Image (spheres, grey):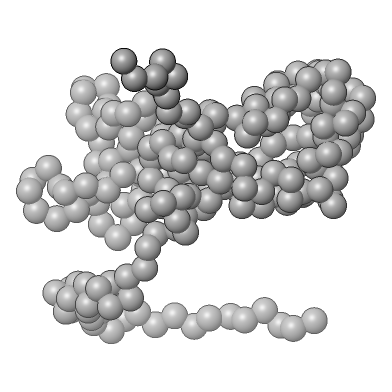
Amino acid sequence: MTDQFTPVFSFDGELTDAAEFDSLMADAENNTRKPSKVFKPGSYDVTVKGVRLLGPTLADKTWMKALITYAGTGENEGKEISSLVLVPMSASLKYSKADGEGSIYPFKNLMETLACLGITLTRDNVKSVIPQHFAPANLNTLVGRTCTAKIGYKGAYAQGQKASSGEGFEVVIMNYGEAYKDDTGTVITFSGDNAYADAEKYAAEIGLTFASFPDIVQLSAPKVEDTDSAGSW
């Protein structure tokens, strides 16, 4: 077994000048800028790029986890986002949670996800539909199917902005679309090198569920453009 590496830190010297650092970072950003692979909050047309089976769930071994990866289209080509669904592997369509209680929600969520991809899943056809799309040899049947994804944060999140003083940069906690305020109505802000980490720590201390990255909050079938079937007058 290889011994664990032990780093030796020595930050006693003078840091690179702040103005020079900012200039170098700006040059590096301009020279190596690449399109972001991360979706910003909003609604996007997406296409299934792939499906990966992650094995049985911990609470109920008769269900498995499947990760569906969606890719952006058009100007959002190259961006990807993934969503996890639970898939039954037996005739029991109730998911047994860790506390022993049965839940139909995972099956309902799977029904809604597949419906957005143009696949009808019901109690009566589950024995054929599930193997047809989630057997290891059949995962490509979902690839290329399209839907619309609403992307946002499942919880509070940190957002950077120009400081209210007009100079510098600060971070606020966004919650339900608004910057979080304390009991006095004052927006809580964070600054400095650890601003994002401090915001996440503060959210945990006050009991806010914190989301580090955007996620799919809703899927819907792709919009179909209306066509005039009446003909010309």
Q: Residue at x 33, y 35 (%)?
A: 174
In what quadrant of the picture does the N terminus appear?
A: bottom right
Q: Residue at x 65, y 45 (%)?
A: 68
Q: Residue at x 47, y 29 (%)?
A: 223
Horizontal arrangement in the rendering, residue 71 relative to residue 17 (left or right): right
Q: Position of residue 41 (x, y in %)?
A: 38, 40
Nearer-the-camera pick, 97 or 223: 223
- Circle count: 0
Nearer-the-camera pick, 192 or 230: 230
Residue 39 visible to an observer of this rendering: yes
Residue 189, by quadrant, is: top left
| Furthest residue in direction front, as rendered | 233
Horizontal arrangement in the rendering, residue 193 relative to residue 168 (left or right): right
Residue 63 visible to an observer of this rendering: no
Q: Position of residue 120 (x, y in %)?
A: 72, 25
Q: Residue at x 14, y 74 (%)?
A: 19
Q: Is residue 203 above or below residue 95?
A: below
Q: Position of residue 66 (x, y in %)?
A: 73, 43
| Furthest residue in direction right, as rendered | 91
Q: Is residue 13 above or below residue 70?
A: below
Horizontal arrangement in the rendering, residue 175 relative to residue 37 (left or right): left
Q: Is residue 81 above or below residue 89?
A: below
Horizontal arrangement in the rendering, residue 104 relative to residue 166 (left or right): right
In what quadrant of the picture does the C terminus appear?
A: top left
Nearer-the-camera pick, 51 or 187: 51
